[in-house]
Image (cartoon, rainbow, N blue to C red):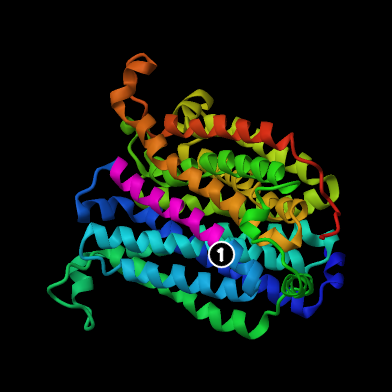
Amino acid sequence: MLAWTKDINSKQWKTFVAAFLGWTLDAMDLLLYVFAFTFIAQTFDLTGPQAAVLFSITLASSALGGIVFGIISDYIGRVRALTYSILIYSLFTMFSAFSPTIEFFVVCRFLLGLGMGGEWASGEILVAESWPKQHRGKVVGMVQSGWGFGFILAAILATFVLPIDSFNLNMLPFVDKDFPVESWRFLFFLGVLPALLVFYVRRVCEEPEIWKKSSEQRKKSTQEFTLFQIFKGDLRPMLLKATLLTSFCMISYWGLSYFVPNYLASPVEQGGAGLGLVKGFGFTIPLNIGAILGCISFGMISDKFGRKFTFGAYLIIVALLVPIFGNLVKVQEFLGFLSIDALVLILAPLLGFFNTGFYSGFGAIFSEIFPTRARGTAQGFSYNVGRGASAIAPPLFAFIAISSFAFLFNGEIIGHGRALMTASIFALLAFLVLLTLPETKGKELD
């Protein structure tokens, strides 16, 4: 199974490590909010839907960041764009910890999103252009698995930091005694750690040869601005399809990711699984172990059987799994012989495997359908406009979850679990768009 590693040189491995760590720590910084949003809502006196909108602001700004950094990476290089994006998302995670008002917090979350979107637009392309074509799916899958590691890191930090009493934090010697120090602030302060990764990236990573050649050609010619190129000719149809695919996939994914931790932790009478905060957050770890394996497996399967077959299979299985996972209590009552804990341990890794695993398809497919001259711009645009569209997911799922719409379901309170099933609809819509894309396995980049 590891014989293929002999084809990879040390520079290519270093490029992978840089992109992988950048994506891992990107996920960690973003997802700290998913665990802490109830604490943040208490600080700023927000309702559940208002807290969901705050998260949506970050997702929306990440769309802008991805588009901007996609263009930047085409002109100044993948490595420099990657370092700038890492600095932005890590620094503004830290700054948000010191927010005196909700307005300051919103600005920090918006700017954090710019860096978050930029990291994918530069990091994924960097490895796709640096590695051999026969292993492109594998490396993109391995990089994408960093999201699961980042989710786990966020869960571990949240589990240990959030229960800390604010009185104990105010006893720290460097804390201003007049400033309220809640545990979520300390958690977000730790988000500055990824900034240290910049030193590694700038030291060991080199620009891909294919980008260097494209850059030289651009200097010698009068090529049109890349953002204009992607809306014309042969690029426009692919851009539209790629954008629709990411939009539907990410609405499905982010609706689940935002609600799953609190679905597991919420009481049964609120439509949750009733596991409590510590155990509910803790069970996101097996979910993301499954996500890691799903991302890595996707790359290996797609290199052998093709991008479309693998991507489509993952989406269909997600659509089937979500209704089961969203009704854990009823499924447990039906089975009788399994506890809720055991059921979550079985289903959570499976959901993580398929619901996150399909993300590995974006980097490989998009690198192969767009040319080098505008790859960063086109890939950054399609992926991050999709991510921007996913900003509707948290408030949409929250809207569905509130009990004021109980009359639509025969007077039954909807709750977190039923809201999750909206993800199945969007997974199926993504599958329909996928059918219109070409198979690109083994394609030479041009």
- What residue is shown at x 37% (from left), y 53% (from top)? 278
**Between 95 and 266, the one nearer to me in the picture:** 95
Horizontal side of 99 relative to 12 (left or right) equals left
Residue 154 in view, yes or no: no
* Res. 121 image quadrant: bottom right
Residue 338 image point, x, y percent: 52, 34
- Identify residue for label 1: 69
Q: What residue span does the magenta drawing correspond to?
A: 49-69
Q: Position of residue 104 (x, y in %)?
A: 26, 63
Q: Looking at the image, which residue is at 50% across and 53% down?
A: 63
State the residue lying farthest toward the front.
Answer: 222
Which quadrant holds the N terminus? bottom right
Looking at the image, which is closer to me, 253 or 230? 230
Q: Is residue 378 above or below residue 80?
A: above
Q: Nearer the viewer, residue 24 or 85?
A: 85
Where is the C terminus found, in terms of image quarters?
Answer: bottom right
* Residue 215, x across and y down, in percent: 73, 73
Query: What's the magenta bit mostly, secondary-structure-wise?
Result: helix
Query: As drawn, which residue projects farthest toward the bottom?
Result: 203
Q: Residue at point 41% right, 42% down?
A: 394
Residue at the image point whose x is 51% and y is 40% from the top: 251
The crowding category of the residue bearing disc 1, from other C-alpha atoms within 10 Å (few below 14, some 14 to 19, many at least 20), is many
Is residue 51 shown in magenta?
Answer: yes
